[in-house]
Amino acid sequence: MSLAPPQSHPQYGVTQLIYALHALSLLVGIVGTATVVGAFLFGVPSIVAVIINYVKRGDVQGTWLESHFRWQIRTFWYGVLWVALCGLFVLLTLGLGVFLVWIPLVFLALWFIYRVVRGWLALSGGKGMYAT
């Protein structure tokens, strides 16, 4: 008995598309005038990707692709949380925090890149993601 290849799942292509949209946002942030964090959270490709995640989430429920959808959604929303915390820090320091807030934002940008690359590589290898 042989198992069907991971690419045969009907939503595999959609999951690839979502990673591609997030990667496009990162690329826009790296080579464009936007920041990586700004392009990932507020860029049209990433916003479209998250919308697709939510619309198609039911189609992957109970499959190995569900972990990828959870990985993608959590990457986006944890990024929103960290940016909000950085903004709050700037507000609470009456604007002086703007001189330090770039440090966590650089780590956040690297984290976004890591999450997209790691997830996409796991997907290409037919592996699920853990839930964090």
Image (cartoon, rainbow, N blue to C red):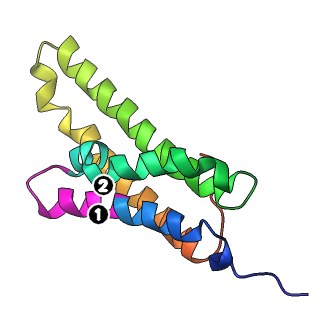
**In front: 77, or 89?**
77
Q: Which residue is the site of mark 1?
A: 24
Residue range of the region highlighted in magenta in the rendering:
22-35
Q: How many marks?
A: 2
Q: Earlier in the sequence, mark 2 or mark 1?
A: 1
Q: Residue at x 30, y 55 (%)?
A: 45
Q: Are marks 2 and 1 in contact (CB under 8 Å)?
A: yes
The CA span between labels 2 and 1 is 7 Å
Left or right of 45: which side holds 4? right
Q: Residue at x 48, y 68 (%)?
A: 16
Left or right of 98: which side holds 27? right
Q: Which residue is the site of mark 2?
A: 45
Decide if residue 132 is in sight here: yes
Instruction: Please state the horizontal and vertical placement of residue 108, each as a whole percent of the image.
Output: 33, 45
Q: Secondary structure at mark 1?
A: helix
Q: Residue at x 34, y 46 (%)?
A: 47
